[in-house]
Amino acid sequence: MRIATRRAAALLLVAFLVVPLGSSSAQSAADFRQVPSADWPSVGGNWANQRYSSLDQINASNVKRLKGAWMARLNGSGMDTKYSQQGTPVVRDGMMFMPTGQQDIFALDLKTGNIAWSYISDVDPKSPGGWRNRGVAVADGKVFTIQKDARVLALDEKTGKSIWETQIGTDLGAKSPKYSSNAIIYYDGLLYTGISGGDSGVRGRLTALDAATGKIAWEFFIAPAPGQFGNETWEGDSWQFGGGAGWMHPALDPELNMVYLPTGNAWPDTDGGVRGGDNLFTASIVALDAKTGQYRWHFQEVHHEIWDYDNANSPVLFDVSLNGVMRKALAHTGKTGMTYLLDRTNGEPLIGIEERPVKQDPAQKTSLTQPFPIGDAFVPQCAHDAVPGYAVGCIFDPPAQNPVLLAPGPLGGNDYSPISFNQKTGLLYVGASDINYAFGLAHEKIDPLTGEKTKLDGIGFFLPNGTKRSGNITAIDPTTNKIVWQKPNVWPKGMGSGIMSTAGGLLFSGDPDGNFVAYDANTGDELWRFQTGFGADAPAITYMLNGEQYVAIATGGNVLAYSAPGDAVWAFKLDGNVGSLNAPKAPPTVGAITGVPVVADTVSIGRNWNADLKQANVVNEYAFGPDNISVPVGTSVTWTNQGDVQHTASSDSGLFDSGLLSNGDSFSYTFSSPGTYNYFCTPHPWMLGQVTVK
């Protein structure tokens, strides 16, 4: 065992004093360093992404009086099942600015929710990637957004009319599987955003643009080119297709002039044999000069990543005092279920992070060690409550030819749900998912200019039928990295609404069953809940208007949570007069086939089964219709992709695998033996199907 040999650090086993972040200097019109109060001016609340408000009019003693002040409907935007509402409202200049998964942007009146203007997106329905938009930036009289197809737009703040448009990633070609899902951050005349698609071989990057003109100022590539620091950690030319998606927005420290970027996994996802080395700067926190994009430091949380343990969440910044000396801290919580606490001036661990030996697979060229922060993991580190028929393993065990159950899974730990640092309690609040996943080998080859996969074999990772999907909310003391309290939750809290905390001693978080819930920040006890009628999977905010505190959340469902789609934005205040809605159908809490058995020999991908009409005619990009069929021995079953994106029909056991199917493509397999055959979609492993052969 050695102490962070890849990033030297002292083990600091002493108490910290948590103090507010940032100076008290006068702020400019678009200075978001302070804790929000009247407004919520940036997606993370402030540049530090603390998601904490100093408002306390709504508090633990009166939160039970909270009711709807208004509910806005966004003209049906995002109502289709392929869209996810993961957007955070931004409140500035007396208005609320709200994106939808359909890529539309709305400006709402803060008091009534009435739509002041809307921008209707023209993104190609067949463009690659997931349909989500996590938030806009508002500054200099403009609303800035990045569309799914990686176009950055500047809209007039008062009218929504387009001012300029810039396509990023033009070097990748028009048919590249690039897309974008992150929010935009504004700082001192620059915009920061990035490109996703790393799961399809796209070389990720952070892009800075001039907010006045849209001109690209600089780009930092996650996989360095030859001659650049870090390229030596890539075998051969594997860096060219190395992945490293920018899933979420960065944090920013204006005093240090640094921007802190969380980076995605390397590609191919579960095939490390073609990309030997640590694969910098994937699965890392990277600090850059905010003005020039020059590298300052990095900390890699997972070396040679082959489990989809990418950094899908934004880091959080705050300051601490160590023996009377101020230390500038950065916290990041990972899919690994661990909390990484770093000195944000240089990337050194504050508490201590040990490099521990892990299981090896020479064929996968696995790293000899992995970083383990000293302190408490917030989810189990080994598979548990396992479904029968699988070998069971622990974090960082290599994927195997015969799939092995590991935990956390690729949707486990803290995925993209934002965390909160509360300046009053001094605690970090984390939503987490506890889900076993099956990990098998998969080999892929792709042309990043066309998006065409020329080879696909193996299984990759998937959610086995019957697997429990649950989670927790955890309070962590950042001075010790120890759990203060933890409350189990029926829902996987690491891939949804996240946590917003206030000086009123409250935490707010939405659930996929439509409930919006308030918790006591000191104990985790539930204090209030409200049924919104749609999947409440987006981050919450709070603001003050005319002397009244409001709490707001968009409710539009989430593909990964199987929750009900919607087009609503809710605002709440004490003694509001808008009541709750009927509850939507609750998502499953286990990985399960939801349909009743249907006698059929054809399956439509991208469609739900309509039991009344006995047709697969209900559009759902991420579904098999029907998902549960019964056939006699000797039947040839045919799958046809009617969706807009590529899918597969891949047997859990590896018995059959369609390979990638584009729209209109079909695949058939003849079942010669009786039994139950489970299958899934390789790119979207939460899509499950079953064939029963009698």
Image (spheres, rainbow, N blue to C red):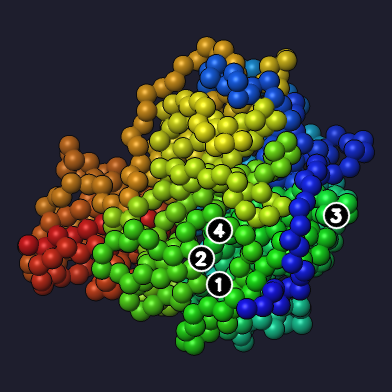
Q: Are marks 4 and 1 in contact (CB under 8 Å)?
A: no
Q: Amino acid at mark 4?
A: Ala
Q: Residue at x 44, y 26 (%)?
A: 531
Q: Residue 400 in the image: x percent, y percent?
A: 39, 77
Secondary structure under tag 1 reads loop
Q: Would you say 448 lies left or right of 592 here?
A: right
**Pointer 4 residue:** 377
Q: Nearer the viewer, mark 4 or mark 1?
A: 4
Point out the image quarter for the C terminus. bottom left
Q: Callout 3 environment at 10 Å: few (<14), some (14 to 19), or many (20+)? A: few
Q: Are marks 1 and 2 in contact (CB under 8 Å)?
A: yes
Which numbered dot is residue 323? Answer: 3
Q: Residue at x 83, y 39 (%)?
A: 31
Q: Callout 4 environment at 10 Å: few (<14), some (14 to 19), or many (20+)? A: some
CA gap, disc 4 and disc 2: 18 Å
**Pointer 2 residue:** 308
Q: Quadrant of residue 49?
A: top right
Secondary structure under tag 3 reads loop
